[in-house]
Amino acid sequence: MLILGIESSCDETAAAVVEDGRILRSNIVATQTDIHALYGGVVPEIASRAHTEAIHGVTEEALSAAGVTMDDIDAIAVTNAPGLIGALLTGLSFAKGLAYSSGKPLVPVHHLRGHIAAVYLVEPELKPPFVALCVSGGNTELMIAEDYTDYRFVGTTRDDAAGEAFDKCARVLGLPYPGGAAMDKLASIGNSEAFRFHEGSVDGAPYDFSFSGLKTSVINTVHTEQQRGRVMDDTFRADIAASFTKAVVKTVTGRLEMLLQNSDPALNVVLSGGVAANSHLRKACKDLAEKYGRKLYLPPLKLCGDNAAMIAAQGYYEYMAGVRGDLSLNAYATKRV
């Protein structure tokens, strides 16, 4: 079965063709990074307009790269939540029009389920149930995947997501947007003990995440050091990046370890999302999985960020579960997995 996936939840316009939820036939992504770098972050209105300009060409390219036409496609999977509402509506409207004109079924896909499904494309043996940790620019979620379309919520972020915190801290350090890769590189050469940033916690919700206070602490520390005459040189930036990264990783892995201690020891772990590309988080999660005798499944770096292959992969399982959308299907900026 061939699924055409369409993704436009933030600033990547993407289309892909996936066979049977596991075999990647094509994956085309048009990035807007250079556009938004001018503003130091994603501008929703500009993102929506850029999606409108790119989506038709990206979809045609994905079909061509897969060596198929719309006649060969069995269903169209599209991200409808969560994300920037204007960006989501652009992809959803295009997908609905394409489904209507081609007579193909339309399948709505939750963006975070898609991030987790990215691992299916490189790990043929991976099957639910498993622990799923999704860490991205807009979301940080801890779940248990009971089945391909059945997720049990465990914990979420109460404010900023981990990826958002990385980008905002990178910005105050004067690093180029997006800041995740630059922060990762600097953290590898900096002193993680140079500054003490404490992990956030949520009273009464031990599995939930909070990164807003951590982000603010970094910003205040940078401003305080500058007022004291500290020059923001490469060493200072590296030490801030290393100390901040250590706190983020400790926050995330602390919740994951708690879940591993209190869940079925047969459950393996999936780490996914844009921040799953961070080398420090990948290593820490691998070490933690080994400590508890679990196997850690990771997407390759090219599938960590937003892409349509992950939407098509999850779309296959949603389709097999009978999930369908019609022309009244709407988009949602926030929605529980």
Image (cartoon, rainbow, N blue to C red):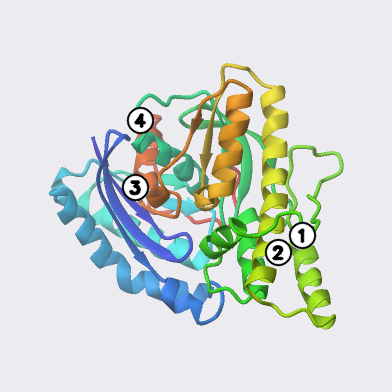
The residue pinned by badge 3 equals: 309
As drawn, 177 above or below 274: below
Residue marked by disc 4:
320
Mark 4 or mark 2, which is nearer the start of the sequence? 2
As measured in the structure, the alpha-carbon distance from the residue carrying label 3 to the one carrying label 4 is 17 Å
Secondary structure type for disc 1: loop
Q: Are the two marked residues, 3 and 1, in contact with CB atoms closer than 8 angstroms? A: no
Answer with mark 3 or mark 4, whichever residue precedes in sequence: 3
Q: Give the amino acid at mark 3.
A: Ala
Q: Amino acid at mark 4?
A: Met
The answer for how far apart the CA atoms under marks 2 and 4 are is 47 Å
Q: Amino acid at mark 2?
A: Ile
| Label 1 crowd (10 A; few <14 / some 14-19 / many >=20) | some
Q: Earlier in the sequence, mark 3 or mark 1?
A: 1
Q: How far is disc 2 from disc 3 in space, using C-alphas? A: 35 Å
Name the front one of labels 2 and 3.
Answer: 2
